[in-house]
Amino acid sequence: MEPTTLILLLFIFILSAFLGFELISKVPSQLHTPLMSGSNAISGITIVGALLAIIQSNDSQFAGWLGFAALILASINVVGGYMVTDRMLGMFRKKEAKKD
């Protein structure tokens, strides 16, 4: 990888981290759970990218392991996002009356 490409990718990473931090810090606390559960569900795109990285890592064993780690972490993120969403929606369901 060329040094200019590495510097460009590092710049994009730092810029996206700063933008993400600023965006999340401006969100009211009441909207954090829906926003984060939705963004965790979007991590399904990361799963597709990780699968592509695993498939195309013929000449690099490191790329295969990195793709596998991304697949595991993105899967955990997606499942966690759905669990948080389900728990949040459970707070709005009507409670059933106890039958004695």
Image (cartoon, helix red, strand yellow):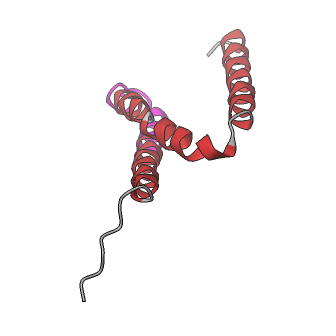
Q: Is residue 76 left or right of residue 48?
A: right
Identify the residue at horizontal 66%, vertical 12% (top origin).
5
Classify 100 as above or below 51.
below
- Residue 79 within the segment the image draws in magenta: no
Q: Quadrant of residue 48?
A: top left
Q: Is residue 3 left or right of residue 75?
A: right
Name the residue nearer the viewer: 97 or 72.
97
Classify 75 as above or below 20.
below
Q: Quadrant of residue 78?
A: top left
Identify the residue at horizontal 35%, vertical 61% (top origin).
94
Across and down, in percent, residue 98 comes to 29, 80
Q: Quadrant of the N terminus?
A: top right
- Residue 55 within the segment the image draws in magenta: yes
For the stretch drawn in magenta, the main secondary structure is helix
Across and down, in percent, residue 39 comes to 50, 36
Across and down, in percent, residue 75 comes to 40, 46
Name the residue nearer the viewer: 68 or 13.
13
Across and down, in percent, residue 77 comes to 47, 47
Part of the protein shown in magenta: 54-70
Classify 72 as above or below 21.
below
Q: Is residue 93 left or right of residue 22?
A: left
Q: Quadrant of the C terminus?
A: bottom left
Name the residue nearer the viewer: 31 or 77.
31
Classify 87 as above or below 41.
below
Name the residue nearer the viewer: 87 or 22.
87
